[in-house]
Image (spheres, rainbow, N blue to C red):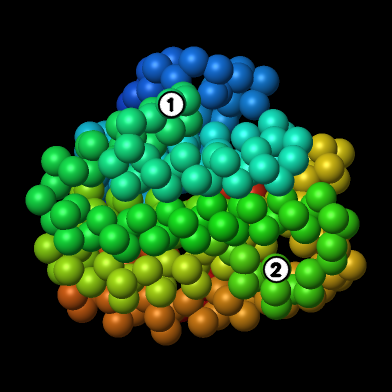
Amino acid sequence: MPDDELDEAFELGRTCALAAECGRDLQRCAQMYAGLFPVAAFNAEFYSGLTLSTAFSAPWATADRLKMVNRAALWVLAVDRLVDHTATNREQVTRLTRECLSVADGAVPRSAVTRFLADMRDELATVKEFEEARRLWRDQLARTLAGMTRAWVWRDTGAAPTLARYLDNADSRGSCFVDVSHWIYAGDGWTRAHLEELRGVSRHVQRYLHLLGDVASYRRDVSWGDLNVLALGVSRAEVTGAMAALAGQAPGLIEPVRASSPRTAVYLRRQIGFNAGFVGISALRPTA
């Protein structure tokens, strides 16, 4: 085997091992919050897919450095399940939002989901930059919860938002909140000092991932009664056209980051590339 192939194989193996280590941490983490992660929704395949995504987005990292990005992603998915499959009325969704924001502001948690959030909040507080970044972190959390609430209302009322309006609500996906949490916890100095600027790039990537997730999960969403852009009267051609446009614009937004923080730029590009490849839609990844 040529040396370059051997090196590539080694890196692939190392990254898969990193994902497996992260997966074990997430499963231990899930056991700490009773009832929040039922096995039917959060099985071994789920943890594997989540940690493969983060490991291949930042393969240079250690499991400890990826702890926050994985846990934030897990928390977002737990909240999404509570909103989509547990809440039966608007007041329950509003109360969940209110309790999460209160805990983000320092309140004592009163449920498994807010205890998980409080533990992330306290872990982030071990990073000195969190004091300055806390306002932005809390703001992105509020945007995520507001997006989930809006999506719940659309589904509950049978609304059919336009593609543009649907995309404007991409904060409901939560990936920007995950990115901000990760960068506060494990980002380099430049990244931590430019979170507001990077949040704009992350939100662009989030819009792409929002549509990608819907295309990948259309049949499941329809069978479960979940909101999906393809069930709102928007054609698949419109959706894939919007995805291609977002993917084409992404390099122009990400590339300027590379000069100051190469790894942050790679992380953002790989968010698109890995997820598109993972669900088998490689034609819609950035080409440059």
Residue under label 2, please give it: 166
Badge 2: residue crowd in 10 Å (few <14, some 14–19, many ≥20)? many
Residue carrying label 1: 110
Occupied quadrant, residue 264: bottom left
Can you tell which mark lies on residue 218? none
Counting from the top left corner in percent of width and height, residue 56 is at 39, 47
10 Å neighbourhood of mark 1: few (<14), some, or many (≥20)? few
Q: Is residue 41 visible?
A: yes
Q: Looking at this view, is 131 or 169 the one in front?
A: 131
Residue 83 image point, x, y percent: 65, 40
Q: In the visual, does 114 lie left or right of 189?
A: right
Judge whether residue 69 can be spotted in this image: no
Kind of residue at disc 1: Arg
Of the pair 265 and 114, the residue shown nearer to us: 114
Residue type at numbered disc 2: Tyr
User: At x 55% / y 80%, what residue is drawn?
Assistant: 248
Q: Quadrant of the N terminus?
A: top left
Q: x and y percent of residue 249 in the render? A: 51, 82
Could you say which quadrant of the image residue 89 lies in? top right
Residue 155 percent coordinates (x, y):
80, 52
- First of labels 1, 2 by sequence position: 1
Q: Residue at x 21, y 49 (%)?
A: 186
Residue at position x 50%, y 72% in the image? 204
Considering the numbered disc 1 on the image, is that residue within a helix, a strand or a loop?
A: loop
In the picture provided, is 186 more to the left or to the right than 166? left
Q: Nearer the viewer, mark 1 or mark 2?
A: 1
Relative to residue 254, is residue 36 depicted above or below?
A: above
